[in-house]
Image (cartoon, grey):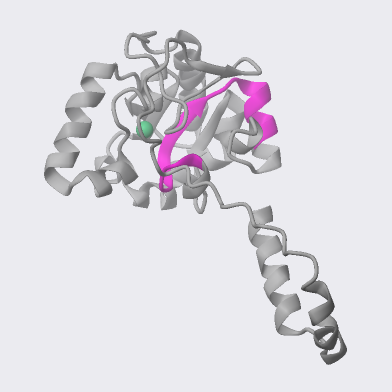
């Protein structure tokens, strides 16, 4: 978001440069213009990146994305702590007549491979890479990712429409109090590597989730790995 702002400001300055400033411009040519850093694109996989021997953990927070894959053998199962937090959240949501369900949580390497290969066969690799992770790169392999929907609202499961439902909105406002963050927010595809997924939540613990929520940043920005 900051980057966008800066870019906007720059354009604005160029557009409304006063004439006397423009006349001074040749002087500046003596010093070569600073090379702009290319914006990293987290949607792209690195060529020849091998799966590591250990997962990446920064400040006690595990990160899995297209730049930080997991070992093929990393198979922790669904996190008990995350499940307990989800159940507590579910109990509170029920009071607002929202019946949350986690329709997909832990997926091991082999399962992700079957899913991804199926998507590639159906939509081609480029399209599949936008909405599905290659095996070893899925956050679902960490046991900390919960795809959440509502029972009886199956038509909104894993759909952009979930964000506009009562349940989707409730989660956006409350999930952090239970330790979950909206992992792939709107407009952050170049940072997280994925298009907006209103249903995909990641357990990071209450303290970190509250901090990330208050700062309005992605996990990548929070851990400074973007
Ligand atoms: Zn997911």
Residue at x-position 42% and y-position 18%: 142
Q: Residue furthest front?
A: 30
The magenta region covers 192-212
Q: Quadrant of the N terminus?
A: bottom right
Q: Nearest the camera: 122 or 157?
A: 122
Occupied quadrant, residue 10: bottom right
**Residue for point 35% across, 30% down:** 48
> Is residue 21 depicted above or below 136 in this figure?
below
Residue 42 falls left or right of residue 75 = right
- The quarter holding residue 206 reads top right
Nearest to the observer: residue 129 or residue 29: 29
Q: List x then y, in percent, for residue 149.
A: 36, 36
In the image, residue 46 sits, relative to residue 188, either above or below, namely above
Look at the image and tell me whether residue 73 can be seen.
yes
Look at the picture and state if 19 lies above or below 49: below
Quarter occupied by the C terminus: top right
| Near-viewer residue (193 or 94) | 193
Residue 203 lies in the magenta-colored region: yes
Residue 182 lies within the magenta run: no
Provide residue 112's location: percent of width, then percent of height: 25, 25
The image quadrant where one finds ligand 1 is top left
Q: Is residue 31 left or right of residue 75?
A: right
Q: Position of residue 151 (x, y in %)?
A: 30, 33
Q: Nearer the viewer, residue 224 or 87?
A: 224
Name which residue lies at 30% across and 20% down. 107
In the visual, does 159 lie left or right of 217? left
Residue at the (17%, 48%) spot, across then down: 123
């Amino acid at each position: 978001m900051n980057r966008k702002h800066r870019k906007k400001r720059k354009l604005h300055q160029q557009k409304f440069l006063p004439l006397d400033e423009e006349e001074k411009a040749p002087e500046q040519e003596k010093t070569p213009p600073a090379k702009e850093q290319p914006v990293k694109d987290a949607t792209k996989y690195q060529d020849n990146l091998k799966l590591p021997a250990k997962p990446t953990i920064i400040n006690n927070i595990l990160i899995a994305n297209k730049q930080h894959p997991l070992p093929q053998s990393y198979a922790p199962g669904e996190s008990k702590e995350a499940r307990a937090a989800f159940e507590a959240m579910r109990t509170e949501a029920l009071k607002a007549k929202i019946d949350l369900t986690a329709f997909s949580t832990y997926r091991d390497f082999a399962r992700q491979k079957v899913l991804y290969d199926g998507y590639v066969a159906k939509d081609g690799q480029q399209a599949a890479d936008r909405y599905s992770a290659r095996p070893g790169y899925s956050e679902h392999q960490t046991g900390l990712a919960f795809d959440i929907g509502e029972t009886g609202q199956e038509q909104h499961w894993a759909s952009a429409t979930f964000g506009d439902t009562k349940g989707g909105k409730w989660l956006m406002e409350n999930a952090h109090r239970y330790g979950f963050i909206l992992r792939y927010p709107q407009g952050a595809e170049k940072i997280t590597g994925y298009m907006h997924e209103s249903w995909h939540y990641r357990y990071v613990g209450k303290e970190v989730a509250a901090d990330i929520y208050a700062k309005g940043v992605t996990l990548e920005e929070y851990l400074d790995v973007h």
